[in-house]
Image (cartoon, helix red, strand yellow):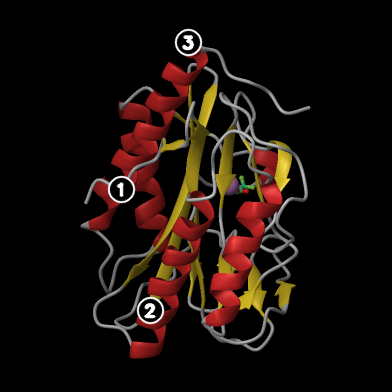
Amino acid sequence: MISIKSKHEIELMKEAGMMVSKTHKYLQKYIKPGITTKDLDELAEEYIRSMGGIPTCKGYEGFPTALCTSINDEVVHGIPSNRKLKNGDIITIDMVIGYKGYQGDAAWTYAVGSISDEKKYLMEHTEKALYEGIKQVKPGAHIGDISNAIEIYATKHKLGVVKELVGHGIGTEMHEDPDVPNYGRPGCGPKLKEGMVICIEPMLNLGTADIEILDDDWTIVTRDEKPSAHYEHTVLVTKDGYEILTPRLD
Ligand code: MF3
Ligand code: CO
């Protein structure tokens, strides 16, 4: 069942989303060679709690930290550790924040220092693929319209589309119906209605789409060890289109 949020619920989701945006902005200045992902996680948790938010990932199915930090060939769900960021890395920071029982969720990939042209290409086109998907959102559109727009854009730019992980509905839970795949056919899947809120989140690879999971049972990496990028927004279906609840503040 896909929940329709009331006006009041939408207000709370906007606040949760804004906390996610602010935390991304707050972390950005620290993303430099030498900092550890654990440092970033501690900064994030303190900042989230200072706003009255809850870092939802921490303790979710046993996940240990507030942030997911995924470097280079790590696609998603990297666990913060003593690993130091190096010049030329890319890092995806993914976080979910709860506020008064409602969730906001956004992931963005960041450059550490100066990065290669191919990593720039990957980041630019993964973010653009996300917006291609978001542009489809309006009442009456189908989930497949979003999925297809992302797949077409990614394929045109010769990027591998990760299929095993998908976007999702969001509300009081971080993962609600419907699934929002990054591949599919237009006109297929559930129909969007005003008041639904979904997370759209392409994970695109510079190489093939194939992934594997590390021994920590969380970190997903590309099989060919080529870099991967991931951009995600929480998006509200409005009367005639959409509103991004996790806007970039930079
Ligand atoms: N943003 C991620 C998602 O969309 C959050 C899951 S991380 C977890 O699925 F560690 F909490 F599982
Ligand atoms: Co998500």
Q: Earlier in the sequence, mark 2 or mark 1?
A: 2
Residue at left 61%, top 23%? 172
Residue 78 pos. (x, y %) = 56, 62
User: In 3D space, how far apart are the residues under numbered discs 1 and 3 (Cα atoms)?
Assistant: 23 Å
Q: Which mark is residue 89?
A: 2
Amino acid type indicated by mark 1: Arg
Residue 210 vs 249, above or below: the answer is: below
Image quadrant where residue 244 sits: top left
Q: Which mark is residue 126?
A: none
Amino acid type indicated by mark 3: His
Some atom of ligand 1 lies within 8 Å of the CB belonging to the residue at label 1:
no
Q: Secondary structure at mark 1?
A: loop
Asked whether residue 227 is in view, the answer is yes
Residue 248 pos. (x, y %) = 30, 48
Horizontal side of 64 relative to 46 (left or right) equals right
Q: Which mark is residue 8?
A: 3
Q: Earlier in the sequence, mark 1 or mark 3?
A: 3
Amino acid type indicated by mark 2: Asp
Residue 50 pos. (x, y %) = 31, 27
- Write down the residue under mark 1: 248
The quadrant of the picture occupied by the N terminus is: top right
Q: Secondary structure at mark 3?
A: helix
